């Protein structure tokens, strides 16, 4: 592709979708050319995200939008029950897609993996875009090799529907792989405690216990803008991978 890659944000009027739209409008590397959502159809995206009129309306038909706007890359920040269909449309149009929607079941991921393999178009699923959260998972994976007694506490705002969070599930998966445990979805292996309260954004604490000592690894996102550097990194990696991949490797 020549020039800056042209990006469509699916779920552009949601809280995270708006942050991504603002970030892309300020980006020197990527160009926002379209936004799709069921809410605020026809409204100017710039006005939705409070940056003024930019001449790009919110649309509702993803397939038509991808074609009309000549989209190179798509980002999905919607809801779990919509992701499979959204990704299928993107792959049908040969548009690589970055998935930030959490709450996907193993069956959902399997479907997306099949679609990506069938079309040969990349899909990158990222449970958490915060660079600090990625480092936290990396540190936890290393700690789990030496301290296998561990529990996770994930804390989020009340509007977050999925429990446990995608970040917590991914952290557990990484730690159990490090410990050589096969059933990464077994909740008895590494318990996860979910908290939903006003005032929270996205937080996770991983507590390791051993004889005479406790190790705590914690990450806090106080603003959704903390995810934007990871979104840019995800778009960069999306152009280099094949098939479906989960997580950002630093």
Image (cartoon, helix red, strand yellow):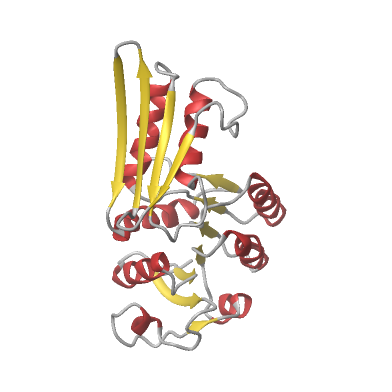
Picture quarter containing residue 141?
A: top left
Q: Is residue 225 left or right of residue 44?
A: left
Q: Is residue 68 left or right of residue 195?
A: right
Q: Is residue 179 left or right of residue 210?
A: right
Counting labels gives: 0
Residue 176 in percent (x, y) is at 52, 26
Q: Nearer the viewer, residue 194 or 242?
A: 194
Q: Is residue 138 left or right of residue 220?
A: right
Whether 66 is drawn above or below 212: the answer is below
Residue 162 in percent (x, y) is at 52, 52
Residue 227 in percent (x, y) is at 34, 55
Residue 216 in percent (x, y) is at 30, 29
Residue at x 45%, y 19% (from the top left corner): 148
Picture quarter containing residue 16?
A: bottom left
Residue at x 40%, y 81% (from the top left corner): 45
Whether 156 is drawn above or below 28: the answer is above
Residue at x 49%, y 39% (from the top left corner): 170
Quadrant of the rendering where the C terminus is positioned: top left
Whether 226 is drawn above or below 136: the answer is below
Residue extending farthest top: 211
């Amino acid at each position: 592709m020549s020039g800056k890659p042209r990006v469509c944000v699916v779920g552009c009027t949601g809280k995270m979708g708006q942050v991504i739209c603002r970030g892309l409008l300020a980006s020197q590397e990527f160009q926002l050319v379209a936004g799709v959502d069921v809410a605020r159809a026809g409204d100017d995206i710039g006005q939705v995200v409070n940056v003024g009129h930019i001449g790009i309306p919110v649309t509702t038909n993803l397939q038509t939008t991808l074609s009309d706007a000549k989209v190179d890359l798509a980002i999905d920040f919607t809801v779990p029950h919509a992701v499979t269909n959204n990704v299928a449309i993107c792959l049908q149009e040969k548009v690589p897609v970055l998935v930030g929607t959490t709450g996907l079941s193993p069956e959902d991921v399997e479907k997306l993996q099949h679609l990506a393999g069938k079309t040969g178009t990349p899909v990158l699923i990222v449970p958490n875009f915060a660079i600090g959260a990625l480092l936290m998972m990396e540190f936890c994976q290393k700690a789990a090799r030496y301290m296998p007694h561990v529990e996770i506490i994930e804390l989020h705002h009340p509007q977050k529907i999925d429990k446990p969070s995608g970040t917590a599930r991914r952290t557990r998966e990484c730690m159990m792989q490090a410990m050589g445990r096969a059933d990464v979805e077994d909740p008895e292996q590494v318990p996860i405690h979910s908290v939903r309260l006003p005032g929270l954004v996205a937080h996770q604490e991983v507590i390791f216990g051993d004889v005479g000592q406790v190790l705590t690894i914690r990450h806090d996102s106080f603003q959704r803008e903390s995810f934007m550097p990871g979104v840019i990194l995800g778009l960069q990696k999306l152009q280099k991978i094949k098939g479906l991949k989960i997580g950002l490797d630093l």
